[in-house]
Image (cartoon, helix red, strand yellow):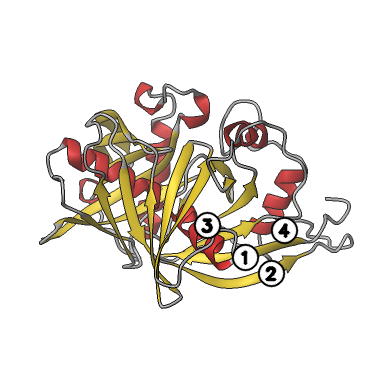
Amino acid sequence: MTTAPRPVHAVDYHTAGEPFRVVCDGLPPIPGDTVAERCATAIGPGGSGTAPRRGPLDEVRRLLVREPRGHAGMYGGFVVPPDDDGAHFGVLFWHKDGYSTACGHGAMALGAWAVDSGRVPAPDTGDAHVRIDVPSGRVAVTVHREAARTTGITFRNVPARIGARKVPVATTLGPVEVDLAHAGACYATVRARDLGLDVSRAALPELVRAGREIRAALAGHPGTWHPDGPLLSGVYGVILHEELPDTPRGPHQRNVTVFADGQVDRSPCGSGTSARLALLAEDGRLRPGEELLHESVLGTRFTGRLLPGTAPDAPVTEVTGTAHRTGEHTFTLDPHDDLGTGFLL
C-alpha cells in the first residue's frame, strides 16, 4: 500500500475463545446488490475464498488480519447493507487467507455487537432477535439477556445438507474415511483417532497437518459442490473430532476445526457444529429434544440442537454459546511504514 487508507474503526469480540473483529466504517465501496454478490466481488474470479481479489477492500482485510495489528488466527467481518429490509445488516466474513461464506461464531459476536451498540434494541431481561444476511443466506441470532447483561447467544443457521459419506482419503498418517456436510460452508469431518491422534493442544501441529492434507485431497470431489454454485462449494474446513462420554442430554464431542490454509478455530466452530449435527442426525445419534455438547481444543463449549419439524435432508440447526467484547480500536497505516499492511508468521 503506497498511501495510508482511511482510519479503520473496529470493535473486537471473542466467541468461546475465537476472535472476531467487527468493522463497519473505513470501507471502500463494494459492488454488488446482495451480500453474496459482494462476497463474490471480494473473492474475485474463480470463487475461491483463499484467492481474494487484490484491491482497496482487501488492503483493509490485510491491514486488520496481519501483524502487528492482527495475527494468523484473526477473524472478522465487514458490516455491509442487507439484501432487503428483512435483515438488520449484512456481513462479509474474512480470515488470514481471504473470505468465507459462513461463520457461526462470527454471527454470535455480531449479535452481541448489534445489541451493545444499540443497532438492535434489547430488553434488560429477555431476548433480542438479530437477523443477518451472510453470503450463504439469512441467519437468525437470539441474544439472551438478564439484568441488562448478555448471558448467551443462539445462532440459527441456514439449512444443512449432507454432501457425501465415508469418502476415502490418503494422508501421511494413514488412510481415513471422511464425511462431507454443507452448513453455510462445506466441512469435511473425520475421527481424530483414525489418524492416531487425540484432540489436544499437544497434538495441534499434527492435527493441522492432517487437516491441510485432507482439504487438499478433496479438492474437486463431487460431494464438496453445492447446488447453489461455486461460491458455496469446495471444502472450507476440516473438523477432526473425538468422542467424550455422553451427557444426559445427548452426545458429547471435542473437535478442532482447521480451515483456510492451516488456520485453527479456537472455538468449537459454529457452522462446523451445524455440520456435525446434520451428520449425527443422519446416523441416528441425535434425536429430537437432544443436544450435542461440543467442546473446542481450549475446552470452551457450544451446545447444538436440531430445530423440531425440519426436513431430514435439510435440517435447520441452532447453536448456543457466549461472546464477549475485548476491545475497541482505530487502526491506521503510516505511509512511511516499510511493513505496509503487515506480515504473517
- Find disc 3 in the rendering and name its residue: 110
The reply to whether callout 1 and callout 2 are in contact (CB within 8 Å) is yes
Residue 44 visible in the snapshot: yes
In the image, taking residue 212 as reference, residue 336 lies left or right, namely right
Quarter in which the C terminus is drawn: bottom right
Residue shown at 19% from the left, 42% from the top: 280
User: Which of the two discs, 4 and 2, labels the residue nearer the N terminus?
Assistant: 2
**Which is nearer the eye, 27 or 173?**
27
> Which residue position is annotated with label 1?
11
Residue marked by disc 4: 342
Write the residue at 13% across / 44% down: 285
| Label 3, label 2: how far apart the Cα atoms are | 16 Å
Which mark is first along the chain, 4 or 1?
1
Disc 4 or 3, which lies upstream in sequence?
A: 3
Q: Nearer the viewer, mark 4 or mark 3?
A: 3
Whole-angstrom CA distance, mark 1 to mark 4, is 20 Å
Other residues around mark 2 within 10 Å, as few (<14) / some (14–19) / many (≥20): some
Q: Is residue 148 above or below residue 209?
A: below
